[in-house]
Image: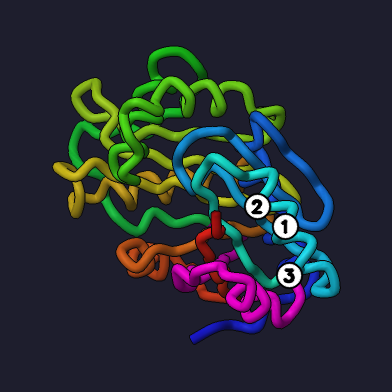
């Protein structure tokens, strides 16, 4: 079931989402029609379009995206901040639908620990240096990102212009990073991204420990809401933590 969101809350959530994705624009970050970002990395999650403001310019926007994102794989995100009809218009222009991602939110008026973490596990905040590289290596492996891109992903993470708003969390067990999440603290929203657990450590409470830490970090920094885009495998965990679906992002693969 999808809840009916407050208009102001939805605006804050989508602004948080845009800020996070646009922060990947190491090569180009352009606010306009469309809002687009280009890391230059050969991975679609790190290049794309995050919003179209007017359906009247969709053909021009697609031409711009094709030109400015040429040479890298990219995605076009169509969320509640894009005009109605955008998804159909993109399909008509050759973009290929990859499905929908539920957008889920919950209040941060309180944070409960719903699950006991595995013995010996700790969740720590990550700065730069080798621990940042371990965090990138862990979520990249889970996402299927080529190890050859590791240096580039680390460089973009470390060089984000909004790093003051980003909290990176690593679940550490026996001295090794076994899980990750990245939280964007902006627009009164704790946007939770890159929740990943290493294959050998799944279904052991690591994801729950990361989620508890992310929600606590958001509350401590004065955020009102937590928000995330849910994968099918992650949605049951998020519902256990009180998240409710409020909208969807429709995801398209950008045509060459």
Q: Which mark is residue 82?
A: 3
Tell me the SS state at disc 2.
helix
* Residue name at image x 56 percent, y 33 percent: 40
Task: Work out whether residue 223 or residue 186 is closer to the camera in this orientation and state it.
Answer: 186
Q: Position of residue 234 (x, y in %)?
A: 35, 62
Q: Label 1: few (<14), some or many (≥20) within 10 Å?
A: few
Tell me the SS state at disc 3.
loop
Residue range corresponding to the magenta coloring: 81-110
Tell me the SS state at disc 1.
helix
Give whichever of discs 3 and 1 has the lower sequence position.
1
Give the number of the mark in front: 3 or 1: 1
Residue placed under numbered mark 1 in the picture: 63
Task: State yes or no: residue 222 in magenta.
Answer: no
Q: Position of residue 155 (x, y in %)?
A: 53, 21
Residue 156 relative to residue 152: left or right: right
Residue 22 visible: yes
Query: Gap between marks 2 and 1, in whole Å?
Result: 5 Å
Asked if marks 3 and 1 touch (Cβ < 8 Å), the reply is no
* Residue name at image x 50 percent, y 47 percent: 73
Q: Quadrant of residue 47?
A: top right
Residue 221 visible: no
Query: Gap between marks 3 and 1, in whole Å?
Result: 17 Å
Give whichever of discs 2 and 3 has the lower sequence position.
2
Q: Quadrant of residue 9?
A: bottom right
Residue placed under numbered mark 2 in the picture: 66
Task: Work out whether residue 203 or residue 77 is closer to the camera in this orientation and state it.
Answer: 77
Residue 256 relative to residue 186: left or right: left
The quadrant of the picture occupied by the C terminus is bottom right
Query: Gap between marks 2 and 3, in whole Å?
Result: 19 Å
- Numbered marks: total: 3
């Amino acid at each position: 079931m999808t809840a009916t969101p407050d208009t102001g809350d939805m605006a804050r959530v989508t602004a948080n989402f845009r800020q996070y994705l646009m922060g990947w624009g190491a090569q180009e970050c352009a606010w306009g029609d469309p809002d687009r970002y280009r890391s230059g990395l050969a991975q679609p999650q790190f290049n794309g379009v995050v919003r179209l403001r007017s359906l009247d310019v969709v053909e021009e926007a697609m031409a711009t995206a094709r030109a400015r994102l040429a040479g890298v794989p990219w995605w076009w995100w169509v969320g509640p901040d894009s005009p109605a009809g955008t998804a159909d218009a993109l399909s008509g222009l050759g973009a290929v639908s990859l499905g929908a991602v539920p957008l889920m939110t919950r209040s941060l008026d309180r944070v409960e620990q719903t699950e006991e973490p595995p013995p010996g596990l700790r969740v720590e905040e990550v700065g730069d240096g080798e621990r940042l590289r371990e965090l990138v290596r862990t979520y990249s492996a889970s996402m299927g990102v080529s190890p050859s891109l590791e240096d580039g992903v680390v460089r973009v993470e470390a060089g984000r212009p909004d790093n003051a708003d980003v909290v990176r969390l690593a679940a550490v067990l026996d001295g090794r990073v076994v899980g990750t999440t990245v939280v964007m603290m902006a627009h009164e929203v704790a946007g939770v991204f890159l929740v990943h657990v290493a294959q050998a450590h799944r279904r052991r409470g690591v994801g729950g420990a990361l989620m508890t830490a992310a929600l606590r970090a958001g509350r401590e920094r004065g955020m009102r809401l937590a928000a995330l885009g849910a994968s099918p495998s992650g949605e049951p965990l998020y519902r256990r933590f009180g998240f409710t679906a409020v909208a969807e992002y429709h995801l398209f693969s950008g045509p060459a």
